[in-house]
Image: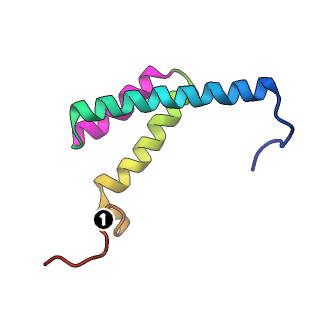
Amino acid sequence: MPDKIGVPTARSMGSAFGSYGVGIAGGLVYNLVAAFMGSGLLGSLAAPIAAGSVLKGTSGQIISVVAGFKAAGELLPGLFGNGGNRSSGRGVM
């Protein structure tokens, strides 16, 4: 639930645009490192750590936490039921 709901102002729109830019920067770093390191264990660790360290403060922490949360379901699918299986549901022939 948001703290407040109000009329958009130039300041609030500027702040939202800045947050959007931070997200793009973090996503670029994340994807570049992931492409370079691969999708294995090393890549899944290096990408969020690099993105979180490039972005300072709360934004970097958020990226690292969300990436770790996502990785838990992908790296440890047995612990979370069928969480890591992204198949289309069709049987194997």
* Residue 37 image point, x, y percent: 22, 33
Name the one closer to the observer, 58 or 31: 31
Judge from the rendering whether residue 76 lies leftward or rightward of residue 1; answer left or right.
left
* Residue 28 image point, x, y percent: 40, 29
Judge from the rendering whether residue 52 lies leftward or rightward of residue 3; answer left or right.
left
Q: Quadrant of residue 79?
A: bottom left
Q: Quadrant of residue 86?
A: bottom left
Name the one closer to the observer, 80 or 24: 24
**Residue furthest out toward the left:** 93
Q: Which residue was labeled with disc 1?
A: 85
Quadrant, the C terminus: bottom left
Residue at the (52%, 20%) spot, across then down:
56
Name the one closer to the observer, 21 or 43: 21
Residue 7 lies within the magenta run: no
Task: Report the magenta residues as a range.
Answer: 41-55
Q: Amino acid at mark 1?
A: Asn
* Residue 65 image point, x, y percent: 47, 40
Residue 47 lies within the magenta run: yes
> How many numbered marks does the figure carry?
1
Residue at the (86%, 37%) spot, across then down:
7
* Residue 62 image point, x, y percent: 52, 36
